[in-house]
Image (cartoon, rainbow, N blue to C red):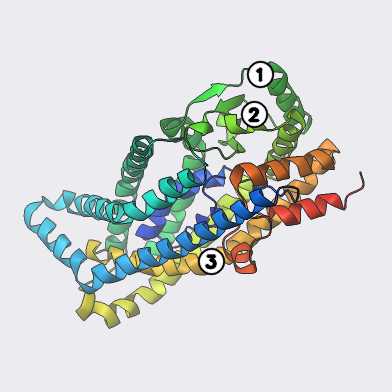
Amino acid sequence: MRRSFLSSLAVVGGGTRAMRWLPATVPKLVRDEPAARFDPSEPDAIEKAVRYSRLRERLWLISTAWGFALDGFSLASRTPRTLADTIRAVVQPKFQTPVFVLAWSMQDWLLRLPLAYYGGYVVERRFGLTNQTRRGWLVDSLKGFGVGAAINTPLTTGFLSIARRYPQRWWIIVSAIALPITVLFAGLYPVLIAPIFNKYEPLEDDALARRVREMSEAEGVHVSRVMRMDMSRQTKKANAFFAGVGRSKRIVLADTLIDQFTPEEVETVVAHELAHQVHRDTWKLIRLSGVATVSGAWLLHKVFPAIVRRTRPLTGASTLGDPASLPLVSLVTGVFGLLAMPLVNGYIRRMERSADRYAVRLTRDPQSFIGAMRRLQQTNLADPDPPAWVRVLLHSHPSIGERIRWAEKLPK
Ligand SMILES: [Zn+2]
């Protein structure tokens, strides 16, 4: 929920950008983002949410443009070529690719850090959405880089060596390997990665845990654990999600949700999450990510040689398997991802509407659904009715305004 653009799920292509996205994407496969709330009785709160949302959207535009500009500038200055040649001169052959990948990701992370700091810390603090200290934010960011690098370096190295060895068939091999890796991450994420950033404990509120468990079991969803997570460590925003697949499956309630929502509202949120389980939405997203990977990789295979031919004198990039071509791969797959965003988000918004219908049918309590939406609008500072381009391109959920108006029309 916290990071709002679930759509970057488009794991397009087998390139670096896709690899860079993987750690950010997999958690989103199993995590849900409730939107924010809408309260006409508090115009000031709405005004603040609108200001916050416009700022976030501007930041998204700037950081997207910045990402493309970084790749473009570095390619035009032949930095990747120089770096790859330097590494080749001083590092043993078998370590050359991983060293390049690591050095490149570190440089990329550092160049994006100022904007990430402004968006992730300064803005969140200014709008009163976090109590985190600057140091806490930096430590989390460093951990994020470390985890990302530990996952990306071997994956990207593997991708490059497959592209080198099988220049014609690499896209089939990479697509075939990507799917089991996605499923593996979906299973391991709650157990291995999420606890690096937050503390997960069994929920002590026995009554709430029992209600949640009973509701799930009655709908045929077996939950191994009901957990409470200290989301307040990073933000005041609220969230709940099912995490894991198979035996690792658990439902996680953020402390911010438990502390600020009424038990009936928490129940509505849980019912919505339950709907995603019953509808097997995690698997649908994994399937979607598989389709995106195959089509992105095939497209990359088709267009990359032509792009290299036209830009080679400028960039020094050569084949797909050459590490110095990675920033070009990242640029191309970044464009694919951007084009896929409205489609992916449209698909997810449909699943979300269907989960809302299921939740209200299950609880038979549209009033608590509306209450939960209003509260989400306030805790998450969501714009109840964002502009059309934002809804279509960036949002994985229907707007709070749309969700409330839908629920208000239901028979009481
Ligand atoms: Zn949902």
Are the residues flagged by discs 2 and 1 in contact, CB closer than 8 Å? yes
Q: In the shown orientation, is residue 247 left or right of residue 212?
A: left
If you read the primary sequence from the N terminus, does the residue marked by circle 2 or circle 1 appear first?
A: 1
300 versus 211 height, above or below: below
Q: Nearer the viewer, residue 331 or 15?
A: 331
Q: Residue furthest left?
A: 89
Q: Amino acid at mark 2?
A: Ile
Q: Residue furthest front?
A: 44
Q: Which mark is residue 340?
A: 3
Residue at the limit of the structure toward the bottom, as seen here: 310
Tag 2 residue: 258
Of pointers 3 and 1, the one earlier in the residue sequence: 1
Quarter of the figure that contains the C terminus = top right
Q: Position of residue 186 (x, y in %)?
A: 51, 41
C-alpha distance separating marks 2 and 3:
35 Å
Dot 1 corresponds to which residue?
Answer: 205
